Amino acid sequence: MTKIAIAGAGLAGLVLAHSLRDRAEITIFEKARGVGGRMATRYADPWQFDHGAQFFTALTEPFQNYLAPLIDAGIVARWDARFAEFIGAEQTAHWQWDSTRPHYVGAPKMNAVAKHLADGLDIRLATLIGSVGRDGDYWTLADGDGENLGAFDWLVSTAPAPQSAALLPPEFAHHAAISGAKMRACFALMLGFDVPLPFDWDAAHVGEADISWMSVNSAKPERDTAPSLLVHSTNAWADAHANDDHDAVKAHLLSEASRISGHDLSCASHIAVHRWLYANLPKREGPAALIDPSTQLAACGDWCIQGRVEAAFTSAMALSDELTAVL
């Protein structure tokens, strides 16, 4: 059976592995300690934070069909949030999400989706592919210490574009296309409170500020946790301050969130920040996935289309179809 190595256990890697597991022997290598990529959840008992993807939509029929059994199983839930829009500190709109354009989250936490998809797959966590070599017809992989990770017929990267460009050899026919995908950073500020938050909204989009998003994480479906607030910086601010001291980042984002919400949030009992170096990118033109049968290298991910959960699924399924045709 064909052996395929997949770099990355985010949604794209997990969906791809699931789709191909009856046709190939799949091994997923993930540098982090858990699965999910940006569909992640951070724990700080008694709080938890979906500090990457905040929600997702399903605008295409294939993704709707894929989600249906996950919804039936309670792994995905519709989030009918009270939604607000702010321009600076002025709230300009307010409405409630509903079934007309459903917004979804993992339940009881965002990474529940990835954990469900990971079940039964061969996933090597905390394993970074440090080098890639060629041995006859096979790609040979080694970790950061030079230890052998095995030989594979195909190597597929589902990591963010800059990491995929660094991993895949330059003879990959689409190497220039990967290098051209410029991803942007984002900071996630995580605030935990001892008392409920006094907001009339559960989620808010923010304009004309250094933050772009605020959401009451504990208000999402099936969350039986202490009150928590998640704040995302804008990509522009994160790009400009990517290497700043994290205490300075926390202080600035906390000040911005307090100013816009109209409440002093410095009373939080838990304050933490996480930097997503490769968080988002604008919509891209071109193929939904990249494959080079001559070298038996391929890549997919949301960055092939746009930085969205549904884009990760669409890209993975596109690559699955192309690999199925050549395996």
Image (spheres, rainbow, N blue to C red):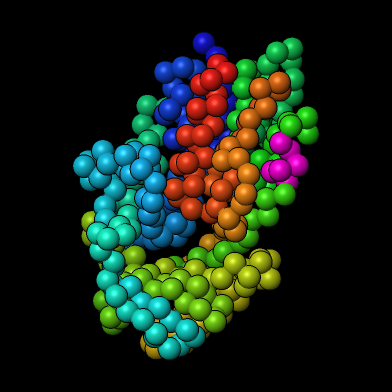
Residue 304: x and y in percent read 59, 45
- Residue at figure coordinates x 51%, y 78% from the top left: 207
Magenta segment boundaries in residue numbering: 174-179
Can residue 259 be spotted in the picture? yes
Does residue 266 appear to the left or right of 200 in the view shown? Answer: right
Residue 289: x and y in percent read 58, 37
Q: Is residue 175 magenta?
A: yes
**Residue 138 falls in image quadrant:** top right
Q: Nearer the viewer, residue 159 or 307?
A: 307
Does residue 27 appear to the left or right of 219 in the view shown? Answer: right
**Residue 241 falls in image quadrant:** bottom right
- Position of the C terminus, as image quadrant, is top right
Residue 4: x and y in percent read 56, 22
- Residue at figure coordinates x 61%, y 52% from the top left: 284
* Count of marks placed on residues: 0
Residue 313: x and y in percent read 45, 41
- Residue at figure coordinates x 49%, y 44% from the top left: 312
- Residue at figure coordinates x 42%, y 68% from the top left: 230
Does residue 62 appear to the left or right of 251 in the view shown? Answer: left
Q: Nearer the viewer, residue 35 or 221?
A: 221
**On screen, residue 299 above or below 271:** above
**Residue 190 falls in image quadrant:** bottom left
**On screen, residue 322 above or below 138:** below
Can residue 160 be spotted in the picture? no
Q: Main secondary structure of the magenta part?
A: helix
Q: Is residue 253 magenta?
A: no
**On screen, residue 207 above or below 181:** below
